[in-house]
Amino acid sequence: MQRVKGLLKASHFGPTLLVTAISFGFATYYWWEGPAYVIAFGVFTGQLVVGWSNDLYDFADDLKHNRQNKPLVSGVITKEYLQKWLRLMVPFSFIANLAGPLGINGGLVYMLGIACGMAYNFYFKFSILSPLPYAIAFAALPSCIAISKDITPPTWMWAGGALFGMAAHFINVIKDMKEDQISEIKGLPQRLGTRNSIVAAFILTLAGVLVIFYS
């Protein structure tokens, strides 16, 4: 049971659950409750991949800052154990999304979002373009469900998703801002600093709300 809890925590369970819930909401709108559960499950597996790869890549830095809330650092699970589950989950998630209600087109769009999440973990996290994978991934999440029904995603959906995604990036970084700067992680929020990142998150969120209501 402790290992299961460790796996869930390593997935960044709060954000993972939120993204899964959002996908379920859109899926019930475009489909119905039965397929919505299948779509949400596929989305959940993709979020596991992103979260687990993030904790594996950040392990050395988490040790450096003694982040005992991370299950790898606290010893609840080992690096080898998490790697084993990640190797299983990557192909499983790919098949689950493409073979499910999302279909090939919708599934590939969602997997693009997952690829962006992993690209952030391994590269964009250190780049001034760090908001870009968040923008693409959050735009892909609702859009893949519309596409699965052969519907062209409306402007408010992908543009609003992109803006909220970038806002989420700035908000997510704020709590670790000082440690990230010590570790020379130079994404856009770290370059701007805490105060400017809060302002950026507010502006992006406001812009997202305006896009949704006025598109």
Image (cartoon, helix red, strand yellow):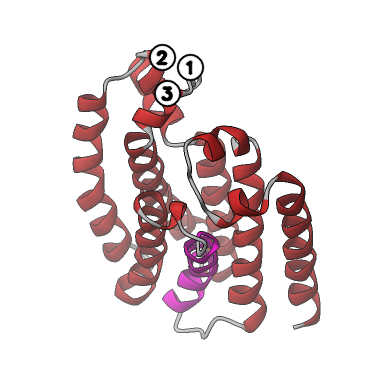
Provide residue 121's location: percent of width, then percent of height: 39, 49
| Residue at image point 48% right, 45% down | 185
* Residue bearing mark 1: 68
Say if 6 sits above or below 167 in the image: above
- Name the residue that disc number 2 marks: 74
* Element marked by disc 2: helix
Q: Are marks 3 and 1 in contact (CB under 8 Å)?
A: no
The quadrant of the image that shows the N terminus is top left
> Which of pointers 3 and 2 lies earlier in the amino acid sequence?
3
Q: Residue at x 52, y 86 (%)?
A: 152
The part of the chain drawn in magenta is 130-148
The amino acid pointed to by label 3 is: Lys
Residue identifier under label 3: 64
Instruction: Residue 19 in the image: state x and y as whole percent.
Output: 54, 50
Please indicate whether residue 48 sits to the left or right of residue 196 in the image: left
> Within the image, what quadrant is residue 30 found in?
bottom right
SS of the residue under disc 3: helix
Asked whether the beta carbons under mark 2 and mark 1 sit within 8 Å of each other, the answer is yes
Q: Which residue corresponds to the image point at 41% horizontal and 41% vertical from the top-left?
A: 51
Q: Is residue 134 magenta?
A: yes
Query: Depth-wise, is mark 3 or mark 2 nearer the camera?
Result: 3
Asked whether 72 or 94 is in front, the reply is 72
Q: Callout 1: few (<14), some (14-19), or many (20+) C-alpha neighbours within 10 Å?
A: few
**Which percent across, then down, holds residue 155?**
63, 83
Picture quadrant of residue 26: bottom right
